[in-house]
Image (cartoon, rainbow, N blue to C red):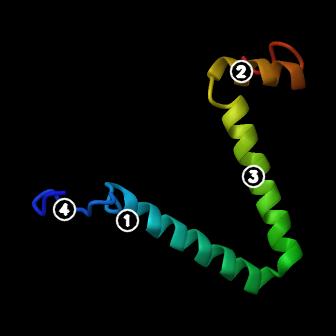
């Protein structure tokens, strides 16, 4: 690669790579801090609930119509609108 473009021949200096490194470092720090403060079982419980919340949020709340359908199934019909 050319020195003006910034980067190495193996492409290790891709755009956004430093940001993903910082995100990984912060996630690792948060996990370590959680393990120290709460212990292993409470941290695992927290991670499981976070993963479930992420899945439910991605699956059901990405579309407004799906949210209304879900609420109509859980609540009496017409109650949400």
Mark toward the viewer: 4 or 1: 4
Q: Nearer the viewer, mark 1 or mark 2?
A: 1
Q: CA distance from mark 1 to mark 2?
A: 36 Å
**Mark 3 / mark 2, whichever is N-terminal:** 3
Question: Image point 59% across, 78% down: which residue?
Answer: 29
x, y percentage for residue 45? 85, 64
Q: Is residue 73 above or below residue 13?
A: above
User: Which structural element holds mark 3?
Assistant: helix
In the figure, 75 relative to 7: above or below?
A: above
Is 32 in front, or is 10?
A: 10
Question: Which x, y percent locates residue 62?
Answer: 62, 29
Residue that sits furthest to the bottom in the current view: 36
Q: Which of the two marks, 3 or 4, is nearer to us in this view?
A: 4
Q: Position of residue 15 (x, y in %)?
A: 31, 54
Name the residue beneath numbered marker 4: 6
What distance separates the C-alpha of mark 4 from that of mark 1? 14 Å
Q: Pointer 3 and pointer 1: residues touching (CB < 8 Å)?
A: no
Q: Position of residue 21 (x, y in %)?
A: 45, 67
Q: Secondary structure at mark 4?
A: loop
| Label number found at residue 51 | 3
* Residue occupied by mark 2: 66
Q: Are marks 3 and 2 in contact (CB under 8 Å)?
A: no
1 or 2: tag closer to the N-terminus: 1
Going from the N terminus, do you reach mark 3 or mark 4 first? 4
């Amino acid at each position: 690669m050319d020195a003006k473009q910034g980067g190495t021949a193996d492409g290790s200096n891709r755009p956004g790579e430093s940001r993903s490194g910082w995100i990984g470092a912060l996630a690792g720090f948060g996990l370590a801090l959680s393990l120290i403060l709460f212990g292993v079982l409470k941290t695992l419980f927290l991670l499981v609930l976070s993963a479930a919340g992420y899945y439910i949020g991605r699956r059901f709340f990405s579309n407004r119509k799906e949210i209304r359908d879900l609420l109509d199934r859980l609540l009496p019909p017409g109650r949400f609108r």
